[in-house]
Amino acid sequence: MHAHDHHDLGTPAVKGEPVTLEIDGVSITVPAGTSVIRAAALAHRDIPRLCATDTLKSFGSCRLCLVHIEGRKGTPASCTTEVVPGMKVHTQSEQLERLRRNVLELYVSEHPMGSCPASAGCELESLAAQHGIRESRYAVGTTARAAHMPAAVDASNPYFVADDSLCIVCSRCVRACEDQQGTFALTIEGRGLESRVAASQRQPFFESECVSCGACVEACPTGALLEKSVIAVDQLPERSVRTTCAYCGVGCSLIAEVSADAVTRMVPDRAGRANQGHACVKGRFAYGYATHGDRVTRPLIRERITDEWREVSWDEAISHAAAEFKRIQAKYGRDSIGGITSSRCTNEETFLVQKLVRAAFGNNNVDTCARVCHSPTGYGLKHTLGESAGTQEFVSVQQADVIMVIGASPTEAHPVFASQMKRRLRAGAKLIVVDPRAIALVKSPHVAADYHLRLLPGTNVAVINALAHVVVTEGLTRDDYIADRCERESYEKWRAFISDPKNSPEAVETVTGVPAALVRGAARLYARGPNSAIYYGLGVTEHSQGTTMVMGIANLAMATGNLGREGVGVSPLRGQNNVQGSCDMGSFPHEFSGYRHVSDDATRGLFESMWKVQLGSEPGLRIPNMFEAALDGSFKGLYIQGEDFAQSDPNTAHVTAALSAMECIVIQDIFHNETAKFAHVFLPGSSFLEKDGTFTNAERRISRVRKVIEPLAGFADWQVTMRLSNALGYAMDYSHPSQIMDEIAALTPTFTGVSYEKLDRLGSIQWPCNDAAPQGTPTMHVDQFVRGKGKFHVTAYVPTRERTSAKYPLLLTTGRVLTQYNVGAQTRRTANLAWHSEDRLELHPHDAEARGIEHGDWVGVTSRAGDTVLRVEITDRVAPGVVYTTFHFPESGANLITTENSDWATNCPEYKVTAVQVVKVAQPRAWQRRRQEAAPAEPAVSPN
Amino acid sequence: MTGAPVRLFVPGDSGAVSVGADTVARDLAIECRRRGIDAQIVRTGSRGMYWLEPLVEVQTPEGRVGYGPVKAGDIPRLLDAGMLEGAVDDLRLGDVDRHPWMRSQQRLTGARLGLVDPQDIDDYLSHGGYLGLEAALSLSPREIVQRITDSGLRGRGGAAFPTGIKWNTVLEQPAAQKYIACNADEGDSGTFADRMLMEGDPFALIEGMTIAGIAVGATQGYIYLRIEYPHAARTLEAALEQARERGYLGDDVLGSGKTFDIEVRRGAGAYICGEETSMLESLQGRRGEVRVRPPLPAIKGLFDRPTVVNNVVTLATVPVILARGAEFYRDFGMGRSRGTVMLQLAGNVKHGGLVECGFGLTVRELVHRYGGGTATGRPVRAVQIGGPLGAYLPASRFDTPLEYEALAAMDALLGHGGVVVFDDSVDMADMARHAFAFCALESCGKCTPCRIGSTRGVQLLDRLVTSPDGARAADKALIEELCDTMAEGSLCGLGGMTPFPVRSALRHFPEDF
């Protein structure tokens, strides 16, 4: 069931020339290709239907939407009939009413009134009731489906129930699984009255290929597929709130339905520009962590990290933290403390934290967790194209002819965008995958990569150079575009560099492991497009040459003219909900909001006059520098909002040593985490359900986060930062996050036109939004690059220092799995555990055999930095010589083995390449066993 | 013995085989060899006189003399009696072409049935085969289509849509790839013309499809063959192989530079896959479920490409039109039903089989003159025309000519030309129930009127026949309402036509309800 207040228009919107027709005497103009049912709904002449819904192509099976069309025989179905100029449609007549009543009675004979729980909002029962049908004349004896289709209820999925006895075989679920999600897990089995929905080979949903995206549940017009949480409440929701998902960088617009101040379900918003009415197993279902018993709801303090936590009042916690920061600054100097913003919090909250650091702490020691993921994106795109952000909006992919996915696994980490991409691929776009691993897109139902460049981890730059080499030396460059839009000198220099035979596919074949012929084929395909789009993930950025690779991607796109229109572009797939926003908001030590350097006097002057304080002109410390300074003894205090270094940052031993060396760490989070073990003050955070604000997704789209329930701990995160600032003596006075956004808009040229009022009106806005683009900017660099002329950079391949050796013969790379999210703090506290309850090490059968390792064995994974133990999964998704793991569980200790290597420009850690050895062991390490037994960790708290 | 061997003809048609033709052929060979007779036994298709099968023919100077029905045990006696010289016997039928059943027919599409060896392309060529394709190759695509249009040929699968207009639609589509899809999923009860053609004269179908391909610009054809037709599959595969070897199919059809080839695809046993859009879904490897029209298959058909979907009989008729001219063909028939129709007579009938003649034969002529009345000898009470979804006609309407418009005027239809005969012991309420039951069994389950309505129809009829008189009127009214809903609301002909047998039974045989 879609959101209960949604006015369903029957079929999806289409683009086309205007066509005017008449429906029941009402004239209406709609785009050519629109269905009659949609035109009628737009004219407020809604026609009954059960198999049609406006997220799915028309199907024409229920036969309720029949109409009369003047000049046409019979009673055509309005969902499958397209409008024609001058068409005259009649939606009501005695004959139509008789037909509809008969069809409804046939349905009701199988699905008696009152079969569905009230909370299901059964469309059939509502429609029948509207037609005055209480029972069916066709109910001859026992005709209910429940009677002739036994063993109907499948409750195997943790989140929803499939009850076949309530099914009306409209195929909406099957079509949603195919068209919207692209998984093809569902089918109709049997025929005639024996037709039923089956998952995979008639398996329980949980055991089938179903990825639990919930599209089928939302599509179902009855209670046949229904959320368990909805069944539990047995009433329609009291209210609903439109908000934005707090998981990945797709930023799905969701409608939270609420009863008795508890969320009963999340429904994807069909008006959501990013998600187009779709969501995934995380956003749609895994929100239960927000009210999990592990939530910290009272402020905590302790003198030493070996002490037990003490529950205190907000006033005490805030004044204690402020006093500690003041003491440290007095003793060690102004620069001895800093703050960390979170890519999980809102733009407004992030903006406030960096304001606190710059204005209240009086230094620029602010950094963000984006440091460890997409900082090379910001740097690389800024220096080539002029803006630190992706160039497209998601729907642009529907115009792409060739899609290149580099170092990303969209079906796992950005599933809702992956579905859009797969739809385009099914429609015929070509696919190039550049990844050491055979990600799902390489071969999945009705999608297959035309080229899979299966490179060795750490050789990205060599591959992108080889691709560009082919483009340049085979005359596939767009010379007019380059002459028009790029810096000539930089191009000439790059051209000379890239043409060098040492960059040819043949020359680098032994380094990259990718056959030259494949590289040549892929380069030609990409260059010929005509519309070629690149999507990339952390497999690009988290390398010692992360920034070089981002520049290499930009070079390739510029050389082939693939920037500045729909269907092309360079699009980073952002990992976290607000990683784009946290970067936009001035979270880096050297930049104010809008990526303006702190040394720029005019910009700084603007901030100084607004904030009424003098600001530093020198960049502050980056996260790794903070750790080093902490170990030096010069950095003693840190305010961390929503970030868990101790689990997520590389080389855990180094991080924990640095954290231990500090005198006051203030953690603001919703759960205890690894970093909190080193903290002195714990300020309870608020989840996305508990506050107002905005998130900015991977397509620069600013979307509203709206408060659904009251903050569990009493305050939203922005209020806590404000109180801390006030306690420190720097006054902040906001009564609503909209005022913070007004301040951001006043201080940031790319946000000038953004306001909550406009966001409410437009739904969402892609920045830049200002006088030049009052509605925002879906596609960047349209007429020229933001920096004026695009700049090519020479991108010489420099191998990482991390290399295999006899001692560490395998290369470890990391990634994510669909059902878990990042370090798992949220998803591990939901039923998503049912799918993925431990991280595993993927090992190629050859490497396994050579080591005598079998599927499911425990293996020790040792690198130069450390070691851990994981259970093994033997698979040829990885190539021989490469191993892979996810890092969602703290007990996996993946970052015990990753090294300190990092990107040359941004210090983004090299998570994606670690030389390791893998050996069979008997069991996990002792600390891991303790972790697992205690999980999830619940530290001792003494009452105050 | 000297000179040419004696030529004997034994049908390999599965209808004949089902009554022992294989055994007869084998025993005949053994017996001839034992007697030192140099005999060549040719396995032909069937003439379509099924009550005479196995029908053995002997080539004599006076023509092909037939004997039938021959049982294996008859062989020594027949040989002793001089069958090889055409001698008299109780089983002797005389010159088969002059047999009253055959003589009065107008065999055009089925001209070679029972005459030729279906696995021998040279036999086909010596009986006028491939003259149509040769003629077509001398014409432009537009001219070929025009000839088909001029001939008045209408789709013989049941819908009777003008073939030329359909081809023209496909011809006009500017697509790089087009297809010819032959609907050989013959599933109507009492029909067998498609099977007879594929088993008895497969090259006619192959030639017809090739002409269609050249006419509309399609390079690939598919025959969607009913899984229950294994004999036809073997015959077709063998014929396709020969046609390819001899250059009638492939990259350069008869040196014309044009490409056309054919693949046989087996159905999976669903009646609904005989509906053209379900057939296309099934051909694409998907669940055989009806597609919404429009778009028409001629515009968006197989793999969403423009596709000619025609029945076997339609396509096998095409060579006749090209070889002998549109006017020749158009001169047969009556009214708007031009050419010949292959009527298949079955059920409770004395002489069942294939009757091909110009449109316009009356039901009475077919049932009595050809069929000889019922097999049981009881009076004929009803016929069902056009398969399980066709209407029942009572004996009082037997003067109706068998042509499209006359039947339509009686709320009946000719369909694929199957005519099933019932004697006076038939219970028409049971027949109406059977129509619903058939629909329920074969419904794809996509549209509601058919998916649910068919089963409710069965249940209503069950209640009707057992309920007290007072309650019957309401149930009859509800059945009529259900028929309206299915006829007006169903997505395809299965649910849409189920009311034909039901309503005709109710109307013409009210006493049975």
Image (cartoon, rainbow, N blue to C red):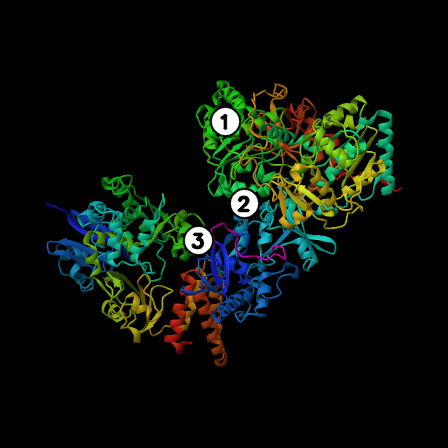
Q: CA distance from mark 2 to mark 1?
A: 31 Å
Determine which quarter of the picture holds residue A145: bottom right
Please indicate, yes or no, whether residue A252 appears anywhere in the rendered image: no
Say which chain tag 2 marks: A
Q: Residue B201 location in percent, x, y?
A: 25, 51
Q: Examine the structure image and report whether residue A576 is included in the region drawn in magenta.
A: no
Say which chain tag 1 marks: A
Instruction: Quickly name the residue at label 2.
Output: A183
- Label 1: which secondary element: helix
Q: Is residue A16 above or below residue B105?
A: above
Of residues A798 and B268, the one nearer the viewer is: A798
A350 relative position to B107: left or right: right
Of residues A335 and A679, the one nearer the viewer is: A335
A656 relative position to A475: left or right: right
Quadrant containing the C terminus of chain A is top right
- Residue plotted at (69% across, 35% down): A593
| Comes first in the chain, label 2 or label 1 | 2
Instruction: Quickly name the residue at label 1.
Output: A467
Give the overall secondary structure of the magenta segment: loop
Q: CA distance from mark 3 to mark 2?
A: 20 Å
- The magenta span reads A1-18
Q: Residue A30 location in percent, x, y?
A: 50, 55
Q: Residue A663 location in percent, x, y?
A: 84, 29
Quadrant containing the N terminus of chain A is bottom right
Say which chain tag 3 marks: B
Amino acid on which disc 2 is placed:
Thr
The numbered mark at residue B288 is 3
